Amino acid sequence: MTYVVGCLAGLILGGAVGYLKNLLLWKKYFREEGSADADANGVGDIYMRSLISFGVNVATLALAFLIRDFMPFNGIALLLGTAAGLVVMNKVLALGGKKRGAKEKEA
């Protein structure tokens, strides 16, 4: 049972960080991308945001690694759940942004 609780706690941690990362890092970029004043330096902006996103993922996993011994459930399950939560939120939010962009192009 401690494995299940650890995985669920990791999914919550990874999902929350993934959602906040998308909200704070990528929403503004996707809004600016659709506007007419998007400059030609967009590739550099994408690389910088991707590097920050990678750093946030690493920091989140490092935090989960450091607190794993203080939690009353399995620490390895916490790490696995955190990684899965980060990946799932990234994919779900990217798919949602893609659908939203397709709807805006139709209108």
Image (cartoon, helix red, strand yellow):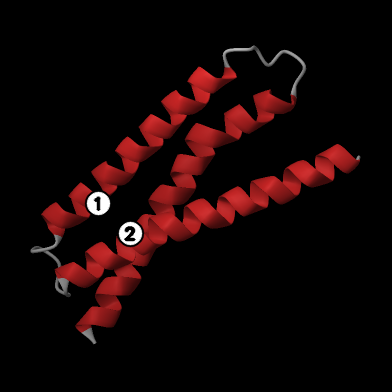
- Left/right of residue 30 with respect to residue 60 in the rendered view: right
Q: Amino acid at mark 1?
A: Leu
Q: Is residue 1 left or right of residue 36?
A: left
* Quadrant of the rendered image containing residue 102: top right
Q: Amino acid at mark 2?
A: Ala
Q: Which residue is label 1 attached to?
A: 61
Q: Residue at x 37, y 65 (%)?
A: 11
Which quarter of the rendered picture does the C terminus lie within? top right
Q: Earlier in the sequence, mark 2 or mark 1?
A: 1
Q: Is residue 50 above or below residue 17?
A: above
Disc 2 is placed on an element classified as helix
Q: Which quadrant holds the N terminus?
A: bottom left
Q: Residue at x 68, y 26 (%)?
A: 33
The residue at which mark 2 appears reads as: 83
| Disc 1, SS | helix
Question: On the rendered structure, is 92 left or right of 64?
Answer: right
- Pick whichever, 69 or 61, lies toward us: 61
Query: Where residue 80 sits: x, y (%)?
Result: 28, 66
Q: Residues within 10 Å of mark 2 (few under 14, many from 20)?
A: many
Measuring 57% from the left and 51% from the top, which residue is drawn there?
A: 93
User: Which one is nearer the viewer's eye here, 32 or 69?
Assistant: 32
Q: Is residue 1 left or right of residue 86?
A: left
Determine the image quadrant of residue 81: bottom left
Count of residue discs: 2
What x and y, as percent, mark residue 75? 16, 68
Residue for point 51% across, 42% down: 22
Q: Are marks 2 and 1 in contact (CB under 8 Å)?
A: yes
The x, y position of residue 41, in whole percent, is: 57, 13
- In the foreground, 56 or 44: 44
Q: Which mark is residue 22?
A: none
Residue 62's place in the image compared with 2, above or below, is above
